[in-house]
Image (spheres, rainbow, N blue to C red):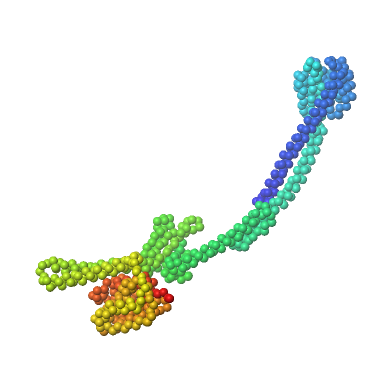
Amino acid sequence: MFASIKWRFIVVYFLLVFIAMVIVGIFIIGRLESQQIANITSSMEQNIQTIIESISELAEDDWMIVQEDIQETLSAWGLGSNETLYVIKNDDIATVIASSSKKNKRIIGESAFTNDKYMDSELILEAYNGEKSSKEIEDPNENTVANHIAYPVLTDVGKVKGIIYMVSDLENVYVTVNESKKILTNATMIALLITVFLGYLIASSITEPIRDVTNKAEEMAMGNFEQFVEVKSDDEIGQLASMFNHLTLKLKDTIREMDVERSKLDTIFNYMAEGVIAVDISGNIIHANPIAIEILELTQEKSLEPYSIFREAIPLKLINLDDINYDDEATLEGDRNLEIDSHVYKVKYAPFKNEKNNIGGLIIVFQDMTNEHKLDNMRKEFVANVSHELKTPITTIKSYTETLMDNGIDEEMEQRFLAVIDNECDRMARLVKDLLQLSNLDYKKTTWKKQEVSAKKLLKEILLKLEFAFKEKNHKIIVDVEENLPNIVIDKDGIEQVILNIISNAIKYTENGGEIQISSRCLDDAISIKVKDNGIGIPEEDRQRIFERFYRVEKGRSRESGGTGLGLSIAKQIIEAHNGEILLDSCFGEGTTVEIKIPYEKV
């Protein structure tokens, strides 16, 4: 029962009222008793004063002379039945000379010290010393309590000539006090009953809303967040209900935001480029995004099977669970590279923690490094090609120079050797020039001097420069340029280099007597310049790499023709720098078509 705050509240309220009533009762009863005794004492002193004045009129010095008169005065005084007054003479034995009580008249003439049943010797002695004193004395035989006062009567010179001793029974006082105690006890019982009743009502008014909030909170804990508490007051309980409702609204907003964030995370997780799987410490795959499922070729059913089942899979066998000690964080993080179906992946793994902040398993990420791997291979191949391209002319120059340094050759042979050296130097110069141009294009250090140029006029100038090359190989040239081509804003030297390179390749790789078609058209947003030949063409396996640096289809023939293998790569970057594109289509043994598109502004 006392586990309920309602009953604890009632008991506390009961105890508070009970203690308060007890304290108040004790204070009131004590105050009433002391006040009653003080009133009786005051009344006794007044009576004594009056009697002293009466006695003083009868005899000024010796009370024995007027003893009978004093007795008559006391008898006629009319004291209450519970009051007794004695007159004691100041002599050696403290003789009682008068008494207001008929019962006690026998002690008249006797010593007050021998009648301690009626009078207190200590009070008499104090009165003989000139001190007024009073005292409550209990009679154990009669079970009564009386108030005793000993009052000295002084002469004109301050000498004690006698004592007025008065006794007042306090029975009425204690009857009144006891009646008051009964009244207070009854009042306390009634107050406590009312307290319990009111405490129950007040506690119910407090605990019922709290119980309502508790029930609604329990419903929320079970997942039902549509819980609101009725606000019935503006006090703290009402504020609690209002805050609960506010908490409900904020919780719904928070859950909505968490759902949005979870949706974002799920979207990011599902559509991120890397494959991600989560493995618990028991070796079970607990989550995998679509990329990871695709990489590992897992089905939805398999992705929930133990991790050990897939330990023999190519990607996962490199992460052996036997090597992982979950108590040693040094073994929980790592990365390694592996190749799967012509794709190169960097596999990274690190631990994650659960809700108890303990390690709950591993997160394994598969990052596709295929392009980076290709770029690295291209870089290595590029360095090898540059080394090879430079090594050949340097070797030739070195050997011919050493031969020239020998004096055993004639002048004609010397001129031939010098011609070869000159050609190899030109070849290295072209290579270095192309490399520098590529470097500038890569790092965007090329300064383009763009100007408005007529496309038709540009093609005419280029064909004029190549006229000798056409005639040398007896090629048939077909030129089809659309009339009224719009002008284009370009770097003339750069675009001219591109077109020259493309047409030169067509001349170079087309047999004598072949046909080369050069056409230009105005498209919706670009000028198209197309070069088509019926030369040797490009094999299908080489088309994807034709724009790579130093890549040649027929390396021996290309090198013999003086090419560096950088022309098409440079051409592609120049066209892209002009926001254009270069397209190549070829059929091995039938010919090649190269088209460049350069944007122009419509008028």
Q: Determine whether 48 is above or below 502 in the image.
A: above
**Residue at point 38% right, 61% down?**
335
**Residue at point 86% right, 21% down?**
54
* Quadrant of the image containing the C terminus: bottom left
Tell me which corner region of the image, top left, top right, bottom left or bottom right, holds residue 500.
bottom left
| Residue 318 % position (x, y) | 38, 64
Depth check: give the residue in front, 188 or 381: 381
Q: Determine whether 94 is above or below 237 in the image.
A: above
194 with respect to 501 (left or right) = right
Depth check: give the residue in front, 126 or 485: 485
Q: Determine whether 135 is above or below 508 in the image.
A: above
**Residue at point 66% right, 57% down?**
212
The answer to whether residue 432 of the structure is visible from this angle is yes
| Residue 332 % position (x, y) | 41, 58
Depth check: give the residue in front, 172 or 226: 226
387 with respect to 107 (left or right) = left
| Residue 188 % position (x, y) | 75, 43
Tell me which corner region of the image, top left, top right, bottom left or bottom right, holds residue 112.
top right
Q: How many marks?
A: 0
| Residue 308 % position (x, y) | 43, 65
Depth check: give the residue in front, 85 or 497: 497
Tell me which corner region of the image, top left, top right, bottom left or bottom right, holds residue 320.
bottom left
The answer to whether residue 305 of the structure is visible from this angle is no
